[in-house]
Image: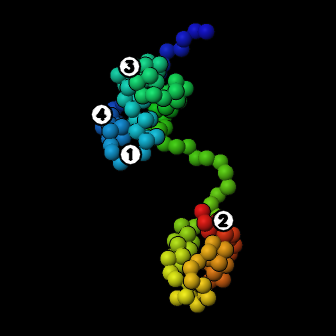
Amino acid sequence: MPVVPARPIAPTASERERLKKMAYGHKTEYRLRARAQVVLHAARSRSNARIARETGLHLDTVRRWRGRFAEQRLAGLADRRRSGRPPAFTALQMSEVKALACRLPAETGAPLSRWSCPELAREAMARGIATFGSASTVRR
C-alpha cells in the first residue's frame, strides 16, 4: 500500500499563538489540548506516526485533526454537531427546577421533609415550569 504524505500545515502567527494557548493552557479541556498539540507538532513537519507516538494518540486520531485543521483551520478543531434528540428543557427551565430543589419542600407547602425526584417533577409540572417531566429527567 503506498504511503500518502501528510498534508503540510502552516498556521499563521495568530493561529499559532491561539494553538499554543490551547495546547499549554491549564484550564483547556483535554480534547482541545490534544488537538492543538497535534497541529503544533504537524507545523514542525513531523510525521503522523511520530506525532501519534509522542502524544499517545491513535494514528487515525492524528490524521483526523491534522486534516481538519488543513481544511478548516481553527474552526476544524471544534466538535462537530452531533445527531440526537434535542434537549427537552431550556436552560431557564433547568435553573428554575434547580432553584426549586434547593428550597425546602415545607417552604413551598409540600408536606415533605426533603424532595424526591418524583415529587420534584410533579411540583415542577404543577407550577408550570415544565409541561412534562419524569423523575429520571429531573435526576439527570
Distance between mark 3 and mark 1 Cα atoms: 24 Å
4 or 73, nearer to the observer: 4
Q: Amino acid at mark 4?
A: Ala
Picture coordinates of residue 43, whole percent (x, y): 37, 25
Q: Answer with mark 1 or mark 4, whichever residue precedes in sequence.
A: 4
Residue 110 seen in this snapshot: yes
Query: On the image, numbered disc 3 is attached to which residue?
Result: 45
Query: On the image, numbered disc 1 is attached to which residue?
Result: 28
Q: Is residue 35 left or right of residue 94?
A: left
Q: How is the image coloured?
A: rainbow
Picture coordinates of residue 90, whole percent (x, y): 58, 67
How many other residues sit within 10 Å of disc 1, few (<14), some (14-19) or many (≥20)?
A: few
Distance between mark 2 and mark 1 Cα atoms: 31 Å
Q: Answer with mark 2 or mark 1, whichever residue precedes in sequence.
A: 1
Q: Residue furthest bottom?
A: 109
How many other residues sit within 10 Å of disc 2, few (<14), some (14-19) or many (≥20)?
A: few
Disc 4 vs disc 2: which is toward the camera? 2
Q: Residue at x 65, y 48 (%)?
A: 83
Q: Secondary structure at mark 2?
A: helix
Disc 1 vs disc 4: which is toward the camera? 1
Query: On the image, numbered disc 2 is attached to which residue?
Result: 136
Disc 2 vs disc 1: which is toward the camera? 2
Residue 9 seen in this snapshot: no
Distance between mark 1 and mark 4 Cα atoms: 20 Å
Viewport quadrant of the N terminus: top right
Distance between mark 3 and mark 4 Cα atoms: 16 Å
Q: Amino acid at mark 2?
A: Ser
Distance between mark 4 and mark 2 Cα atoms: 49 Å
Q: Answer with mark 3 or mark 4, whichever residue precedes in sequence.
A: 4
